[in-house]
Amino acid sequence: MPFPIGVGIRHTADGAPTLHALEEQSLGPRAADRRRLYFSLGRAAAHEALAELGIYGAAVGRGPSGEPLWPAGVVGAISHSGELAIAIVGSHGHYAGLGVDIEQLSRGLTARAARLVCTPAEMAWVDPEAGSTRLTTLFSAKEAVFKALFPIEGVWLGFADAELTWLPERCVFEARLLKAASATHVLGSRLEVRCNVVGAQVLSTTYALT
């Protein structure tokens, strides 16, 4: 990342953390146990990330589309998969948006899912018949892009609204927007997405500058 960020990571082995009263309200009393666990782990990771920026005790609410509601002056994203939850945050003075996504490679995605996730140009790189690693990596990268851009102006992006190209010499994706996401992230804008495969998981991160 070009500017400092805060990072928080929580594991299911840590148990379900206590939620801030406003976070409890946004979750609701009827949430299933699994949903409550992941939500609370994500918020705990978010609090750890905020603490790295010197912000303590702030609630991280939930917007109408499920997006995290950060304290004033902060942007960020939360993701969870399997036994992990991760959050990244940064200053709005540096970043218009931050995106993070974690996926389990063991679950994989089907060839049928590839037709929903990939543009025709992406399909050749993914080659779903050769396995699911590339498809899951591309899926994760797109999720990170959408998480970074949606909170800026609330523009919903589908899988066909960004096209990714793998740059092997830099080990990153270049994401090109096929739909405007905001006044400053217009059609044709590009973001860099870094993906790391670690064990049975892929972690994707990206950012949009102010």
Image (cartoon, helix red, strand yellow):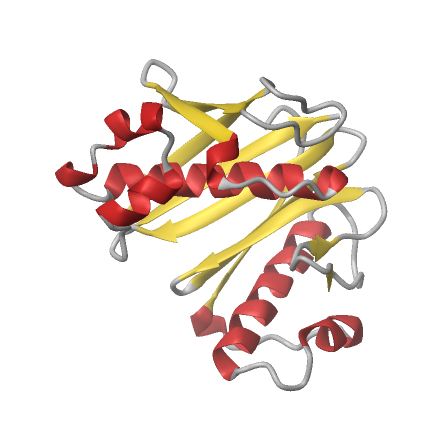
- Residue closer to the observer: 5 or 154: 154
Q: Which residue is farthest bottom?
A: 30
Which residue appears at 28% of the width and 50% of the height?
109
Q: Is residue 199 visible?
A: no
Q: Is residue 128 left or right of residue 32?
A: left
In this picture, is 168 found above or below 135? above
Above or below — where is 67 with respect to 115?
A: below
The answer to whether residue 157 is left or right of residue 130 is right
Q: Quadrant of the N terminus?
A: top right
Q: Position of residue 48 (x, y in %)?
A: 64, 56
- In which quadrant of the rendered image does the C terminus lie? top right
Give how far across and how far down residue 87 sits, in percent: 59, 51
Find the residue positioned furthest to the right.
72
User: Residue 196 lies in what quarter of the image?
Assistant: top left
Considering every residue shown, the one lying at the far top of the view is 169
Q: Position of residue 74 (x, y in %)?
A: 77, 44
Question: Residue drawn at (65%, 56%), measured in percent from left and top?
Answer: 46
Among the 4 quarters of the image, the one containing residue 23: bottom right
Query: Would residue 60 be visible to someone looking at this image?
Result: yes
Q: How many marks?
A: 0
Q: Residue at x 81, y 52 (%)?
A: 71
Residue occupying the point 35% across, 39% down:
137
- Provide residue 59's location: percent of width, then percent of height: 78, 64
> Quadrant location of residue 13?
bottom left
Q: Say above or below: 177 vs 118.
A: above
